[in-house]
Image (tube, rainbow, N blue to C red):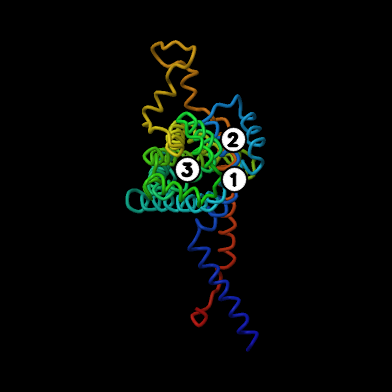
Amino acid sequence: MAERDAETFVQWQRRVLHRYLAAHPTLLTAGPASLVSTIASFPFDSIKSRLQVKHYPSVFSCARAVLREEGVRGFFRGVTIPLVTITFVRTSSFSIYSGTKAWLERHVAPNPDRRLGRTAAYGALGGITSGMLISCGSAPFELVKVQRQLEFLINMQRREEAQRHGRPDLAAKVHSQTGFQAAREIMRVHGGVRGFYLGFPLHMARDMLGSSFYFGLYDTIRVIADRYESRLGLPSAVVSFLLGSTAGITSWLVVYPVDLIKTKVQRDALAGEPSRSAVHVFRSLLSAGPGESAVRGVPLRRFLRLYRGLGISAVRSFISHGITWMMIETLSRHRQEMLAQLNPRLVDFSEYQ
């Protein structure tokens, strides 16, 4: 009798695990993938933010400056909050994206044969929906992340501003903050909760445009890769990594100028500088600098200012999105295998529920 009860309990555990695996596919795949990719790519994101708001001769000189002035932990300044929020945001993003695609297939037109045009359109619409909804919740956390990443530069900017106005006492008050202290200061200085939405229109535009390209492109090249995967001769994990990296880098190439302008607008606001519109920042980036003639048109070197820091962002995207999709698809395969193993001959376990 005891052996029978023990066997029944084990089968009940299998049933519970089976139900959990079946009911939470995104949580079990996108969650761990986002956590690992965030840790691996955060130092590159930190360098990218600094390159966007201050001129350094090269990426390596920026990295050396951070190491010299802030130490190794300078590369991970502000990582705690993003580690939690980015994991949550990406998991939610993938859920909304997947749910939107499923709704379109049920209510608009099914896509059983995975036609490229329809696949791209559904992926893009899923990305737009995800980007629009997620940006509303992620904007405050990203602003705190920017404040923490640029804390050293913002403090320098505040000191210069205080000295110009003959207020060295204000410069002396600058100090390092935790993420929660930074959040409280943003609320205090910038009008409460609405202060978390400095630069929000740019944030939403970046997320909607970027997610649309990202998911639409990934779904498209995923279909193409599936058709020719046997000819590629590469492990499936490597293929997933390369496809995710390609989608990530391409989408960043599209939205990078928007992200650059957003970071500058937010940096100025956080440092107490006079407010500048996105259009003003855009024009200042393309305006003639010292020694340049203000001729008609925009020379290439001025246009490339819109992509300042892109190189390190491409490296970050290559690592982050490659790891994300490699882990998502690998974990998805393992989940399906576990479901297949747990599924057979389940009895009634109502007494254990």
Quick one: which residue is furthest to the left in this view? 108
Q: Which residue is mark 1?
A: 323
In this view of the protein, which residue sits in the foreground, 265 or 125?
A: 265
Q: Quadrant of residue 257?
A: top left
**Quadrant of the frame with the N terminus:** bottom right
Vertical arrangement, residue 353 with respect to residue 274, above or below = below
Spatial separation of the CA atoms under disc 2 and disc 3: 22 Å
Dot 2: what SS? helix
Q: Position of residue 77 (x, y in %)?
A: 58, 44
Vertical arrangement, residue 247 with respect to residue 129, above or below = above
Mark 2 or 3 closer to N-term? 3
Mark 1 or 2 closer to N-term? 2
Q: Position of residue 23 (x, y in %)?
A: 48, 63
Seen at 54% across and 54% down, the residue is 31
Q: Is residue 192 visible?
A: yes
Check residue 219 in the rendering and tell me which mark sits there, or answer none.
Answer: 3
In this view of the protein, which residue sits in the foreground, 173 or 25?
A: 173
Q: Position of residue 178 (x, y in %)?
A: 54, 49
Q: Amino acid at mark 2?
A: Val
Q: Which residue is mark 2?
A: 315
Dot 1: what SS? helix
Dot 3: what SS? helix
Bin the neighbour count of mark 1 within 10 Å (Cα to Cα): few under 14, some 14-19, many 20 and up: many
Q: Amino acid at mark 1?
A: Ile
Of badges 1 and 2, the one in the foreground is 2
